[in-house]
């Protein structure tokens, strides 16, 4: 066979070049992919290094604090170690230089710096300098005082032992003659570590001032006042304030007829459960009682019915945080001169009964937080309150969790300037009518009603918000269904009304249960777009299910069967029926057995009586007749009445009539119902017909069995009831907006790098195989050349 060598060589050369190009392309693609992957890996490494750097930075900060803490610990350890070494040294420590005795009147003060004992020699001291001043540099080192001989003090002993924070004991107080002392104010004030005090020898007949006498004696557990004679004392303010651990006050009848100031007297005596000391108090001259019992957490009973408060001007925080009190009778309180009642009952969380009907609040200007935190108070009669002068009502009813109703119809708020958080967290209030409130001077209503979790209806139609600068969270009311808004409410922005949600319609000329207004707002739109001058009205939320609860009870209101709960939309009709209950017969058929769903939950109650003879049934009770009346729109009778008869509890169904020349205007609401013991009338109203009974020429009517709308193609068209075209069950099937073969997007990106690399490898292997195959064919031929 002749073979053209030159032609064959040319072909072989071309094929070799083609294979070489394929190999290079495959190699470059793989290399490029590898570089891409490497770059990606490099980014990952870089990112990791950055994160590691940040972590290392954090570790450095942690190590810094740990090292400092370790240093602090080491420092303490070294100090402790040095103390231990000092304690076990064989040679005694060198004592600090002894202080020279200090002249103190006709007595002397000698302080031992090693033991911390202050020794007072006997003698006479007139108006003594307080010890903390006489030993100013050592006041914090005094641990004990010893009076070694009889000591007479005259004049003022004010702050005598005060402000010695590490003083624990005073020995020899029984040697002190106090007969001529006139002032004992602050005598032991701020002796926080004093554990006991012996007052058995104290003569207080000339003392006029006991203000802060034991104030802030935080460790004292018992004070014996049985020798005290207090007939000349005018001030007992802060006398036992902050005696946190005081559990006993031993006393006889204290004479307080001249006391004018009892402010903060027992404040924060949180472990003192017995306050019978006040039973003898004469408060006829007292002008200040603020915070008198504040923080008396352990007191469960407090009888202040004998208190004469006719001269008291200040009662703020009077009972604040008396959280164990359950009742408080203040019927005898005369508050005619009181100007401040802020926080008066704040934090009385277990108080369930509070009688303040006699309160005269004519002069009160501040009621801030007055009932704040009265969590258990279910009712509150404020009918006697005159609030014309009150400027501050912020926090007034905050956290009154149990209040179910609150009548403030007598409140005059014309001078009130702040109402923020006023009703916040009144979680049991369902309705609040503040239509009488004048808020022309109010500047803040922040969170005023926020978290009133059960509030369904709120009337603020006469609110004036022109001066209000803060309405933040004013209307965070999750269950609100009705709100009355007025023309002086400029807007609802920032009130968080939008958090309520739902759709709201104005009532217009209708009723709450059947609104007829023309405006419908989403809650967010009402908040943003409300303008009092054009939108003022009552608004109801109409997108919620209304509820009717049907009860079946005996004459003692005991349930005979489970309640039935009917739900529907606002304004829709409902119908209930009685149940047959064995051994009982229906005694009372409720008048609201049928009606319309309303905003508030309604109850339909069927009452049953027990049959006397359970073996027989009671004869049915004949019901009153139901008259069916037919009339035109003008009230003229156009057909004879129908009379229906039946037994109480039986149902009835009335029927309309076909009356020539008339057509029915509307089916009456009571077309169906139940016989009761009272007559009922059902009225059918007709209007004159405007069209003839038969279709006019030139018009067409749709046959009754003709299907229209979306189901037209699925209608039967022959006697065998077969259907043509689209099947009925196809018509209601929703169609997807996606292309037929589209799939839902995943949450991760496709891994294109790996797949591409595999494809390139396959391509390269294919080229090699092609080259080998080609070589196998060509090689034998090449031998001939």
Image: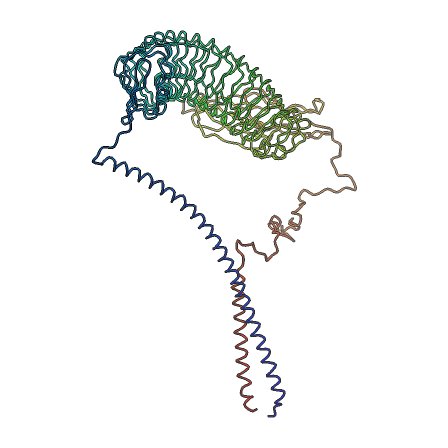
- 571 horizontally vs 127: left or right: right
Question: Where, quadrant-wise, is the C terminus in this rendering?
Answer: bottom right
| Residue 243, visible in the rendered structure | no
Q: Quadrant of residue 246?
A: top left
- 123 horizontally vs 420: left or right: left
Q: Position of residue 663 (x, y in %)?
A: 70, 30
Figure disc tally:
0
Q: Residue furthest left?
A: 90
Q: Identify which residue, 485 or 139, lies in the foreground.
A: 139
* As drawn, 464 above or below 773: above
Q: Identify which residue, 312 or 154, lies in the foreground.
A: 154
* As drawn, 692 above or below 741: above
Q: Quadrant of residue 494?
A: top right
| Residue 374, visible in the rendered structure | yes
Q: Quadrant of residue 392?
A: top right
Instruction: Name the residue rendered at 60%, 51% in the picture.
Output: 736
Q: Identify which residue, 260 or 126, lies in the foreground.
A: 126
Q: Identify which residue, 265 or 734, lies in the foreground.
A: 265
Q: Position of residue 477 (x, y in %)?
A: 55, 30
């Amino acid at each position: 066979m002749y073979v053209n060598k030159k032609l064959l060589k040319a072909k072989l050369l071309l094929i070799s070049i083609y294979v070489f190009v394929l190999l290079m392309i495959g190699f470059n693609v793989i290399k490029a992919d590898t570089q891409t992957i490497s770059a990606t890996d490099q980014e990952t490494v870089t990112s990791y290094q950055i994160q590691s750097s940040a972590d290392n930075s954090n570790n450095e900060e942690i190590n810094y604090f740990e090292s400092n803490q370790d240093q602090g610990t080491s420092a303490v350890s070294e100090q402790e170690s040095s103390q231990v070494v000092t304690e076990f040294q064989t040679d005694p420590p060198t004592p600090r230089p002894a202080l020279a005795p200090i002249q103190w009147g006709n007595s002397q003060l000698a302080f031992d710096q090693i033991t911390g004992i202050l020794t007072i020699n006997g003698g006479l001291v007139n108006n003594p300098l307080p010890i903390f001043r006489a030993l100013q540099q050592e006041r914090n080192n005094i641990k004990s005082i010893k009076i070694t001989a009889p000591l007479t003090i005259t004049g003022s002993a004010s702050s005598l032992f005060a402000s010695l924070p590490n003083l624990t004991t005073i020995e020899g107080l029984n040697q002190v003659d106090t007969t001529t002392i006139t002032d004992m104010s602050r005598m032991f004030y701020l002796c926080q570590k004093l554990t006991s005090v012996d007052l058995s020898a104290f003569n207080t007949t000339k003392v006029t001032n006991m203000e802060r006498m034991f104030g802030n004696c935080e460790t004292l557990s018992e004070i014996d006042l049985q020798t005290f004679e207090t007939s000349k004392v005018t001030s007992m303010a802060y006398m036992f304030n902050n005696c946190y651990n005081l559990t006993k006050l031993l006393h006889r009848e204290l004479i307080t007829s001249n006391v004018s100031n009892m402010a903060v007297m027992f404040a924060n005596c949180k472990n003192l459960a017995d306050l019978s000391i006040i039973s003898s108090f004469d408060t006829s001259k007292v002008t200040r009682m603020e915070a008198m019992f504040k923080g008396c957490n352990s007191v469960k009973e407090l009888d202040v019915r004998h208190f004469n408060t006719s001269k008291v001007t200040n009662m703020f925080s009077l009972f604040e945080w008396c959280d164990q009190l359950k009742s408080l009778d203040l019927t005898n309180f005369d508050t005619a001169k009181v100007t401040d009642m802020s926080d008066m009952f704040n934090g009385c969380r277990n108080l369930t009964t509070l009688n303040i009907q006699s309160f005269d609040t004519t002069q009160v200007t501040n009621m801030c937080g007055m009932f704040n935190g009265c969590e258990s108070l279910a009712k509150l009669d404020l009918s006697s309150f005159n609030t014309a002068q009150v400027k501050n009502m912020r926090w007034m009813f905050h956290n009154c969790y149990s209040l179910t109703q609150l009548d403030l119809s007598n409140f005059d708020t014309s001078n009130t300037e702040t109402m923020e958080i006023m009703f916040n967290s009144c979680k049991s209030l369902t309705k609040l009518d503040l239509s009488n409130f004048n808020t022309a001077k109010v500047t803040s209503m922040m969170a005023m009603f926020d978290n009133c979790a059960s509030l369904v209806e709120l009337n603020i139609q006469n609110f004036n918000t022109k001066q209000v600068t803060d309405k933040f969270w004013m209307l965070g009311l999750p269950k609100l269904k009705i709100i009355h808004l007025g023309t002086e409410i400029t807007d609802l922005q920032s009130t968080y009304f939008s958090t309520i949600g739902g759709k709201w319609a104005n009532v217009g000329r209708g009723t709450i249960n059947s609104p007829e207004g023309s405006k419908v707002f989403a809650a967010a739109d009402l908040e943003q777009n409300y303008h009092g001058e054009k939108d003022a009205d009552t608004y109801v939320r109409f997108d919620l299910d209304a509820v009717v609860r049907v009860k079946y009870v005996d004459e003692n209101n005991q349930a005979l069967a489970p309640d039935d709960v009917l739900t529907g939309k606002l304004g829709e009709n409902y119908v209930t029926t009685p149940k047959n209950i064995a051994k009982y017969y229906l005694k009372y058929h409720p008048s609201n057995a049928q009606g319309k769903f309303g905003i508030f939950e309604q109850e339909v109650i069927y009452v049953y009586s027990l049959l006397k003879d359970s073996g027989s049934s009671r004869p049915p009770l004949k019901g009153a007749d139901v008259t069916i009346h037919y009339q035109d729109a003008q009230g003229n009778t156009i057909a004879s009445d129908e009379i229906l008869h039946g037994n109480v509890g039986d149902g009835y169904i009335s029927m309309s009539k076909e009356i020539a020349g008339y057509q029915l205007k509307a089916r009456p609401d009571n077309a169906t119902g139940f016989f009761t013991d009272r007559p009922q009338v059902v009225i059918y109203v007709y209007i004159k017909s405007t069209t003839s009974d038969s279709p006019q020429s030139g018009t067409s009517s749709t046959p009754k069995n003709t299907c229209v709308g979306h189901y037209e193609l699925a209608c039967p068209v022959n006697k065998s009831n077969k259907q043509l075209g689209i099947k009925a069950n196809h018509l209601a099937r929703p169609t997807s907006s996606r292309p037929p073969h589209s799939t839902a997007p995943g949450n991760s990106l496709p891994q294109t790098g790996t797949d591409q690399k595999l494809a390139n490898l396959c391509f390269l292997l294919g080229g090699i195989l092609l080259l080998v195959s080609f070589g196998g064919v060509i090689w034998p031929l090449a031998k001939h050349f």
